[in-house]
Image (spheres, rainbow, N blue to C red):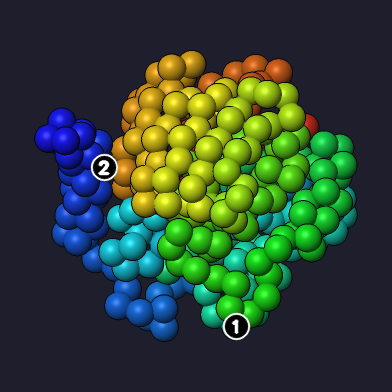
Amino acid sequence: MKKLLLALFLCFISPALASVGVMAAGSYPNSWRSADWSSTGQFPEARDDRQAAIYVMAARTGGLKGALASHSWIVTKPESGSYTRYDKVGWGSPIRVNGYPPDGRWYSNEPEALLIVRGEKAERLIPKIEAAVETYPYSARGDYVIWPGPNSNSFVAHVLRAVPELGIALPPEAVGRDYRSFGEFVTLSDDWRNLELSLGGYAGIAVGQIHGFEIRLAGLVFGIDVLRPALKLPGFGRIGMPAWSGESEERQPGEHRPAPETAQSGDWAIQAVGG
């Protein structure tokens, strides 16, 4: 029992407290009213960019919660079309469409792209994303629970599982990504390369090509990635080698990779969230 408690302290409690301490030492908006929600200008103007595109975005959430959790959303743009942003939020009608600028700040925090897909691949996958949004089972008023879910990250994780061609998972700090209804204990990808076990988002284990090896407890993640050596700590996310090298056109699934200075114009271009 002592060894178990020590392991829990070292792997989960200690890094979580350290992350909270770092956040507390900085400054952040006192409320959503004083926060900056404006566009960051990361995306090109839709009228100047004819290519279809898909963006999976994330930013740290507000207040001290941001020490441990991020908020994620999905943006689509058909060929010669405009941007459409999909979020799940905790007030009003939970699934918001274009409730915020597509590349907007979240509680004053700068967003980063986890994934950018452009060109024919994006055009092909956008209808699947739209279908996954339409069929999300927790889209009614009251269907938002900040912890363990279903929250904003549970929504995006649902879409990513429904469109496996996107080939990514949300990063460790996306609290709620592992939420499942009780009874949905096992999630195995179609290619059998990724396995997740979940007890309603309260606890679980993940192993595979995308996740590496993760132990999940109360929404926090401790894990290791052997294929792309890195440690995953609560609050801090991924520490070590980026999940994406970004050098090869034939890329393997992963969580994220370092962001290039500008979006690439090919079929794939992938950027990373911090951690």
Kindly identify the residue that appears in the image at 12 percent across and 35 percent down: 2
Q: On residue 12, which mark appears?
A: 2
Q: Which amino acid does label 1 sit on?
A: Gly
Quarter of the image with the N terminus in it: top left
Kindly identify the residue that appears in the image at 34 percent across and 36 percent down: 222
Question: Taking 228 as reference, is 239 left or right?
Answer: left
Kindly identify the residue that appears in the image at 28 percent across and 64 percent down: 64
Question: Looking at the rendering, which quadrant does residue 109 occupy?
Answer: bottom left
Mark 1 or 2, nearer chain start: 2
Question: Taking 55 as reference, is 76 left or right?
Answer: right
Quarter of the image with the C terminus in it: top left
Expressed as whole percent of the image width and height from the top left, the position of residue 208 reads: 55, 24
Q: Is residue 30 visible?
A: yes
Q: Is 65 in front, or is 266?
A: 65
Q: Is 150 in front, or is 121?
A: 150
**Mark nearer the viewer, 1 or 2:** 2
Question: Taking 43 as reference, is 6 left or right?
Answer: left
Expressed as whole percent of the image width and height from the top left, the position of residue 107 reads: 42, 68
Q: What residue type is labelled 2?
A: Phe
Q: Mark 1 points at which residue?
A: 92
Q: Is residue 10 visible?
A: no
* Mark 1 neighbour class, 10 Å CA radius: few under 14, some 14 to 19, many 20 or more: few
Expressed as whole percent of the image width and height from the top left, the position of residue 174 reads: 46, 50
What secondary structure is marked by label 1?
Answer: loop
